[in-house]
């Protein structure tokens, strides 16, 4: 199984090491799913990690290590040129939908506007995706 983690899920994993997002990162490291990233996703994550509000909790060195680790360990896919089959109410997230769709991956997000597309796409909140991995969904 493949998954694209919205940058907000990765950031949540860094901020709360015992929550569902952090457990998802652990599941990926255990080989329970293949994590897919792209240049656009890593760029958005880098931009978000530089926000002053986050920089107070995640140091620049740690942010750089995470970005390098993801770029070298996850499946690095090309950013799709095509529009996604379903559009997000937030056009800035369309690249995530297109990436997940193009890679045959689930999209894992905490954003309500993406989760509302669950009837049209395989999109899950982190806790629900964990249950799916554990065979409970």
Image (cartoon, grey):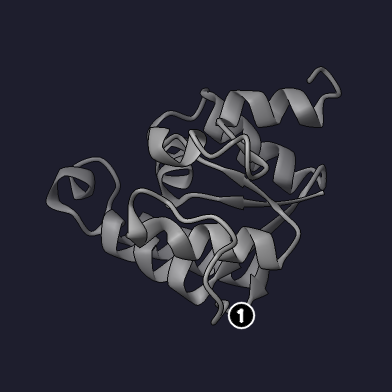
Q: Please indicate, yes or no, whether residue 74 appears anywhere in the rendered image.
A: no
- At x 64%, y 36%, the residue is 24
Quadrant of the rendered structure where residue 45 is?
A: bottom left
> Which residue: 57% across, 77% down?
80
Given residues 58 and 106, the one toward you in this image is 106
Quarter of the image with the C terminus is top right
Please name whichever residue, 117 or 2, is drawn nearer the observer in this view of the structure.
Answer: 117
- Please give the name of the residue rendered at 68% of the width and 68% of the height, measured from the top-left corner: 102
Which element is circle 1 on? Answer: loop
**Residue sitting nearer the eye, 32 or 72:** 32
Q: Is residue 69 above or below residue 8?
A: below
x, y percentage for residue 128? 65, 24
Q: In the picture, residue 133 is in which quadrant? A: top right
Provide residue 100's location: percent of width, then percent of height.
Answer: 64, 58
**Image check: 69 left or right of 46?**
right
Disc 1: which residue: 78
Q: Is residue 91 above or below residue 33?
A: below
Q: Specify whether residue 51 is in view.
A: yes
Residue 115 image point, x, y percent: 50, 35
């Amino acid at each position: 199984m493949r998954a694209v983690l919205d940058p907000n899920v990765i950031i949540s994993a860094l901020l709360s090491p015992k929550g569902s997002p952090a457990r998802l990162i652990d599941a990926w490291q255990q080989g329970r799913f293949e994590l897919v990233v792209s240049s656009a996703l890593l760029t958005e994550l880098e931009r978000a990690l530089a926000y002053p509000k986050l920089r107070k909790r995640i140091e620049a060195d740690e942010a750089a290590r995470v970005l390098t680790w993801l770029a070298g360990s996850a499946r690095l896919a090309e950013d799709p040129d095509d529009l996604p089959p379903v559009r997000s109410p937030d056009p800035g997230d369309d690249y995530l939908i297109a990436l997940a769709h193009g890679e045959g991956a689930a999209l894992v997000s905490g954003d309500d506007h993406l989760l509302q597309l669950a009837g049209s796409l395989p999109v899950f909140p982190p806790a629900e995706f964990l249950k799916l991995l554990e065979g409970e969904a």
